[in-house]
Structures are given as structure tokens and as C-alpha cells.
């Protein structure tokens, strides 16, 4: 699956590029090191060759080469030490060799070719040697002697040096690679800091503590911030425009509805009760729908991270105190069991509207008492409103709270109160359930989120 994380993608891309860059750098460094080591070996062999030429005895009368003295390096006197020399008379193939060769000869494959040659040859024990050979002519006392002079060194010494350097370089490049990856990680985190700030400011806007993003952003991010601010401004303007139009429409319809109600009264006074009743029903229905839409237009949509706080206990007590003074509420026994320290994650105005609807509905249906309680269960606040009214049949429970649904036309109301309650709970991530039965009243259970 393709990663959607910008940080992960940048980190993977950076690690891949660092890996390949280190591979290329390691290869280049290894190549240059090998070249320099071989140049160093060749330089040592050239120096040894020069010293060897300088001590060849040109006055010797024997038919094989001789030296005036031995080379100072004691390794040439130690059998199979890894460094060797050999002087061969090209004409008679008689040779003088270092003690380190013991009884073996070096075969260069270039004995008849004049000039220097640098090549790999087989050593006295079958090992690979780096050999420098020179075929040249010496003149002394009117005599010409054609000699091939060879100096060689065991390649394993060079290979061991290269292998040791390769391991040390691999360890160094590994440490360097890890350091570069960590540096890239910190660089990416530092580069993405403006997006963290952007996320924090967006959360602030969602909580309602700000309306726009700040301006302290890098040049690359500033166009995005400007576009988001423009979008927020446009959204707020659109919402306010829609609310204003809804309010204007509602108030514009109120006047014709008032005229319609006046006509209904006149018809009723003239004895035309049937027509008046129809007009009264239409007027009440339209008024209730207008009120319902007005209340919905005032509700604010909010995300779960938009944290609010409202005191449930005090709002329930205030709503109950108001209802006790009404015609329906003053005749009821209000039993309030409410902890004063329960706060819920709702806008206080929305909670007042919700509690008012629930208690007003209970007072409307109760016969003698209303019981209200609240508790905290499983990270939610549970509000229970129980009236001792006639109750509702099980088949009708699912219809409660649907817009305009009424079960007893003799009881006042439009049937829209619980529909508004459902809207408030949906916006605020709450829930509502009903339990009822004929003759046992109705229990409304509302679960409200607690503040974060």
C-alpha cells in the first residue's frame, strides 16, 4: 500500500538516496585506495629494482649474474617471506635469485620483451605475486649481457590491506549513513513543524477559540494558509447568509399567518366553525414548522474535537424551577436527584434547549410526578427523565421523536420538540432512547458526552 504520510515518504526517499550515495562513495573510495596501494607497491618494487640494478656485478667473469652485495632487506633472505627478486641471463637462461625463492624460479612471460612490465605471476608456493620486471642490456669490457630483472611481492599482503580497509570503511560509512539518516529525520521534522502549527490552529478553530489561521508561516505554506482562511471566511459568510435568509423567510411568513389566523377568528365568529378549524390547523402547523426550522438554523455543527463544557445539574434545576411555575408543572411532584458536579460536552444554549424540551414533554404527559436523575457511566453522562403518564405502546416507541409525530391530539404541542432534541443530540454526538408501556409512564434516557 502506498504511504499517505508525507514524513514517511520523505524519510524513505532520503534513506534510499543516502544508501545509494554511500554505495557510490564507498565504491569510488575503494577504487582510489586500491589504485594508490598498487601505486605504492609499484613504487616500492621500482625502488627495489633500482637498488638491485645498482649492485649487479658487471665485471664478473662467470656466465651467470652476480651481485656486489646483498640487499639490506632481511626478508629477501627468509624463505617464502613474500618478497622476492630474480636476475636471469636471457642468453643462457641461468638465473640468480633471492634466498626467499628457495629453489623456485619466477616466470614472468615477458622475458624477451625489453622495458618494464608490471603483472601478476605465480609465486614459489602457488600464491599470486605482483611482479615488476625489466629486460635490459648491460655493456662492460666490450661485452653485452642481456638480463631480465624481476622483483615481486606477495599479493596477499596487498589483499589483506585492502580487505582491512574495506571493513573499516564499511563501518565508517555505516556510522555516517546512520548519522545522515538521523540528520534527515530531524531536518524533516523541523521542516514539517509549520504543519504541526497549522494542525494546532485548525483544532483551535474547531473548538471555536479562533476564526482564522495566523500569518506566521513560511513562504511555501503561506498560500495554503491564505486559501484556508479565505475558505473559512466564505463558509462563515455562507452560514450567516443562510441563517439570515431563513430568519427573514420565517418572519416574512409570520405576517400572512397572522392574517390567516385573524380570518379564521372572523369565520368562527360568523359561525363557520368548520372552515375556521381548517384555517386554525393550517396556521398552527405552519407556525410550528417555522419555529422548528428557526431553532435548527441556530444549531451549530461541530466536530468531536470541538470541546465544550456545560453544567448539567444547574441547568436541570433551573428548567425544573421554571416549569414548576407553569400551569401544568405546578400540579406535579418534581423529584430531582442531580449531582451538581456533572459537566457535559455541549454548548450551554443547546443543553438548555434540550433539557427544556425533555422536562416540558414530561410535564405535559405526567399525571402526578416527574422524576429526573443523572449519573456518569462509561465515560458518558446519563440523564433519565421519567413521568407517570399513560405511557406509549411498544409498537409506537420507534416513532417517538420523528418530526411532527403526535400520539394524542388532545394534548397540546406540535410534535416537533423531541425531533429538535434528536437534532441537538446528533450534532453533539449524544443519543436518546425511550422505555414505556401502557400505564407505567415513559422513561427517556439521554446519554451525553463528557468534556475531553
Image (cartoon, rainbow, N blue to C red):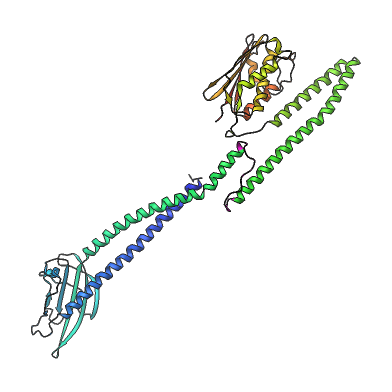
Residue found at x 35% / y 56%: 173
Residue found at x 24% / y 78%: 116
First to last magenta residue range? 206-221
Q: Is residue 164 above or below residue 308?
A: below
Task: List x then y, in percent, for residue 140.
Answer: 14, 88
In screen coordinates, is 144 left or right of 164? left
Total marks shown come to 0
Q: What residue occupies the far bottom of the structure in this picture?
A: 142
Q: Is residue 12 above or below residue 296?
A: below
In screen coordinates, is 41 left or right of 441? left
Task: List x then y, in percent, for residue 424.
Answer: 65, 27
Q: Is residue 168 above or below residue 54?
A: above
Residue found at x 30% / y 68%: 36
In screen coordinates, is 127 left or right of 380? left
Q: Quadrant where the C terminus lies?
A: top right
Residue 140 is a magenta residue: no
Q: Is residue 72 above or below residue 315?
A: below
Instruction: Name the quadrant containing residue 299.
Output: top right
Residue 400: in sight, yes or no? no
In screen coordinates, is 12 left or right of 100? right
Q: Main secondary structure of the magenta part?
A: loop
Residue 83: in sight, yes or no? yes
Name the one closer to the observer, 282 or 395.
282
Task: List x then y, in percent, for residue 294.
Answer: 73, 29
Instruction: Name the quadrant containing residue 355.
Output: top right
Q: What residue occupies the far right of the structure in this picture?
A: 270
Task: List x then y, in percent, for residue 327.
Answer: 74, 13
Amino acid at each position: 500500500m502506498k504511504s499517505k504520510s508525507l514524513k514517511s515518504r520523505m524519510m524513505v526517499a532520503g534513506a534510499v538516496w543516502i544508501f545509494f550515495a554511500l554505495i557510490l562513495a564507498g565504491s569510488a573510495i575503494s577504487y582510489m585506495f586500491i589504485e594508490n596501494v598498487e601505486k605504492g607497491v609499484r613504487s616500492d618494487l621500482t625502488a627495489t629494482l633500482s637498488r638491485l640494478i645498482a649492485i649487479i656485478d658487471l665485471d664478473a667473469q662467470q656466465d651467470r649474474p652476480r651481485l656486489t652485495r646483498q640487499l639490506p632487506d632481511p626478508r629477501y633472505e627468509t624463505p617464502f617471506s613474500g618478497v622476492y627478486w630474480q636476475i636471469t641471463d636471457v642468453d643462457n637462461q641461468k638465473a640468480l635469485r633471492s634466498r626467499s625463492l628457495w629453489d623456485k624460479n619466477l616466470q614472468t612471460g615477458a622475458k624477451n620483451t625489453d622495458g618494464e612490465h608490471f603483472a601478476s605471476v605465480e609465486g614459489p608456493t602457488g600464491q599470486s605475486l605482483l611482479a615488476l620486471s625489466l629486460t635490459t642490456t648491460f655493456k662492460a669490457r666490450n661485452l653485452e649481457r642481456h638480463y631480465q630483472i624481476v622483483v615481486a611481492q606477495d599479493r596477499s599482503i596487498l589483499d589483506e590491506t585492502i580487505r582491512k580497509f574495506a571493513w573499516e570503511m564499511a563501518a565508517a560509512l555505516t556510522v555516517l549513513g546512520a548519522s545522515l539518516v538521523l540528520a534527515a529525520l530531524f531536518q524533516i521534522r523541523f521542516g514539517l513543524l509549520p504543519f504541526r502549527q497549522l494542525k494546532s490552529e485548525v483544532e483551535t478553530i474547531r473548538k471555536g477559540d479562533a476564526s482564522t489561521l495566523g500569518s506566521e508561516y513560511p513562504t511555501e505554506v503561506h498560500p495554503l494558509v491564505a486559501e484556508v482562511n479565505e475558505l473559512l471566511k466564505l463558509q462563515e459568510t455562507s452560514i450567516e447568509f443562510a441563517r439570515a435568509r431563513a430568519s427573514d423567510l420565517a418572519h416574512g411568513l409570520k405576517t400572512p399567518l397572522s392574517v390567516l389566523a385573524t380570518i379564521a377568528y372572523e369565520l368562527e365568529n360568523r359561525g363557520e366553525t368548520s372552515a375556521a378549524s381548517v384555517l386554525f390547523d393550517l396556521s398552527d402547523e405552519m407556525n410550528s414548522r417555522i419555529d422548528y426550522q428557526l431553532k435548527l438554523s441556530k444549531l451549530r455543527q461541530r466536530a468531536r474535537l470541538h470541546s465544550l463544557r456545560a453544567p448539567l445539574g444547574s441547568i436541570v434545576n433551573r428548567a425544573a424551577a421554571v416549569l414548576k411555575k407553569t400551569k401544568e408543572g405546578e400540579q406535579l411532584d418534581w423529584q430531582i436527584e442531580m449531582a451538581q458536579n456533572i459537566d457535559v460536552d455541549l454548548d450551554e444554549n443547546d443543553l438548555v434547549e434540550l433539557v427544556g424540551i425533555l422536562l416540558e414533554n414530561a410535564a405535559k404527559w405526567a399525571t402526578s410526578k416527574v422524576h429526573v436523575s443523572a449519573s456518569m457511566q462509561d465515560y458518558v453522562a446519563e440523564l433519565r427523565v421519567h413521568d407517570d403518564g399513560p405511557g406509549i405502546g411498544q409498537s409506537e416507541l420507534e416513532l417517538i421523536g420523528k418530526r411532527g409525530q403526535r400520539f394524542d391530539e388532545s394534548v397540546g404541542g406540535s410534535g416537533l420538540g423531541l425531533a429538535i432534541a434528536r437534532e441537538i443530540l446528533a450534532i453533539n454526538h449524544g443519543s436518546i432512547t425511550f422505555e414505556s408501556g401502557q400505564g407505567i409512564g415513559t422513561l427517556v434516557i439521554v446519554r451525553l458526552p463528557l468534556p475531553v
